[in-house]
Image (spheres, rainbow, N blue to C red):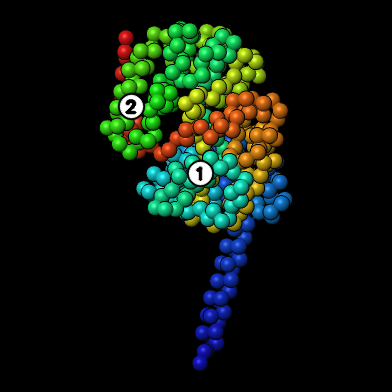
């Protein structure tokens, strides 16, 4: 038999539980998004809130800060985050800061298939998929096509026809790009340090051989743009958006997808381990991957998304530049950066140092 005191305690417990449930429901209506600048434009957020009834709190960040924030809270504080795909498997294995994606909650038909499959493969841990693609870009070639029409691949930067008029960075994308243009597969060797060192040795020899023809090794975007604008250089390895920016000024200069494949980065969607609004997170992903919404994001940030067909809807000038550089076969040929195993960047750094020091 229950007493008044027991019934009161039960009532309070039930009331407390109900209150917690209501609080949970209320918080679940708010999507706490940890993302990059430009990926959640105000007009897109307003459209999403109007269509779904969810509210959105946007926190701007970058890869290092995202991982640090999620590590500090063991995956709490946010409901959806956008690290690059090479920042998912390693942090998940080490810190457990994400939860697996339920792909049945997503409209996979809205994604470019090759990008979706690449991201799934690169974000799989223990058989579970932790990320899907959103915004992407590449390292490719920026070429003055009137002055250097023969430059079609990374190693063409070594051609005698452009000697003294090329520039690229002494950074890991140059090592990777040259390796692919030499018929090697550096990403396939990521799991074999000795095999990877052999590839680096071959690329090192090639870069030293090419060194006399390099005008300068650029280190900043403005430096690169000015070298190409002035005509001091006629071909370079650089980010795709740099070439498109130059194309707006000079129709002869544009971004060229290398024959061996551009090198692609992808910023993803992931679910933090302690997120409280999974439904709102999936609703946001499905919303921003609609082609018409994705095109708004591209217009805002300048980079394209993994939304199938969105490139047809961006402003006409950017659409023309993108489609000229990346017809479907060039998109499918992009080499997407996988997670970097521990130790490889040390090997790469030593290789780059030797190239820099070579006479």
Helix, strand or loop at label 1? It is: helix
Q: CA distance from mark 1 to mark 2?
A: 26 Å
In the image, is residue 7 above or below residue 151?
below
How far from the left and from the top, in percent, is residue 217? Answer: 43, 15
Residue 41 figure quarter: top right
- The residue drawn where x is 50% and y is 28% is 262
Residue 82 appears in the picture as rendered? no
Q: Nearer the viewer, residue 60 or 231?
A: 231
State the count of labels. Answer: 2
Q: Which residue is mark 2?
A: 199
Q: Is residue 236 above or below residue 106?
A: above
| Residue drawn at (35%, 14%) of the image | 208
Rendered location of residue 356, percent (x, y): 35, 16
The answer to whether marks 1 and 2 mark residues whose Cβ atoms lie closer than 8 Å is no
Residue topped by disc 1:
117
Residue 47, how many percent across, how many down? 71, 46
Q: Residues within 10 Å of mark 1 (few under 14, many from 20)?
A: few
Q: Secondary structure at mark 2?
A: helix
Count neighbours of disc 2 (C-alpha within 10 A) and say few if under 14, some if 14 to 19, many if 20 or more: many
Classify 129 as above or below 320. Answer: below
Q: Nearer the viewer, residue 358 or 55?
A: 358
Q: Earlier in the sequence, mark 1 or mark 2?
A: 1
Q: Would residue 93 be found to the left or right of residue 63 on screen?
A: left
Q: Quadrant of residue 318?
A: top right
């Amino acid at each position: 038999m229950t007493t008044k005191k027991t019934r009161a305690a039960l009532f309070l417990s039930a009331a407390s539980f109900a209150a917690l449930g209501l609080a949970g429901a209320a918080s679940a209506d708010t999507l706490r998004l940890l993302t990059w600048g430009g990926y959640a434009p105000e007009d897109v957020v307003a459209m999403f809130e109007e269509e779904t009834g969810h509210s959105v709190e946007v926190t701007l960040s970058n890869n290092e800060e995202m991982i640090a924030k999620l590590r500090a809270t063991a995956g709490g504080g946010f409901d959806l985050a956008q690290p690059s795909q090479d920042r998912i498997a390693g942090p998940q294995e080490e810190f457990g800061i994400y939860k697996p994606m339920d792909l049945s909650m997503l409209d996979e038909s809205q994604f470019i298939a090759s990008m979706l499959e690449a991201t799934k493969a690169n974000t799989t841990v223990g058989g579970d998929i932790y990320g899907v693609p959103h915004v992407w870009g590449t390292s490719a070639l920026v070429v003055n096509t009137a002055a250097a029409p023969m430059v079609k691949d990374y190693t063409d930067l070594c051609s005698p026809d452009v000697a003294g008029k090329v520039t690229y960075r002494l950074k890991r994308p140059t090592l990777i790009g040259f390796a692919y243009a030499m018929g090697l597969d550096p990403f396939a060797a990521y799991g074999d340090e000795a095999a990877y060192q052999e590839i680096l040795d071959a690329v090192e020899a090639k870069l030293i051989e090419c060194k006399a023809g390099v005008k300068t090794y650029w280190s900043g975007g403005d430096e690169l743009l000015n070298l190409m604008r002035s005509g001091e250089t006629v071909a370079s390895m650089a980010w795709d958006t740099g070439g498109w920016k130059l194309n707006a000024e000079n129709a002869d200069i544009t971004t060229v997808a290398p024959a061996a494949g551009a090198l692609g980065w992808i910023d993803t969607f992931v679910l933090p381990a302690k997120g409280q609004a999974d439904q709102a997170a999936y609703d946001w992903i499905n919303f921003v991957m609609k082609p018409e919404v994705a095109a708004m994001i591209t217009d805002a940030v300048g980079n394209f998304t993994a939304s199938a067909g969105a490139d047809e809807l961006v402003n006409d000038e950017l659409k023309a530049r993108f489609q000229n550089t990346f017809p479907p076969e060039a998109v499918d040929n992009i080499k997407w950066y996988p997670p970097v195993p521990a130790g490889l960047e040390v090997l790469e750094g030593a290789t780059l140092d030797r190239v820099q020091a070579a006479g």
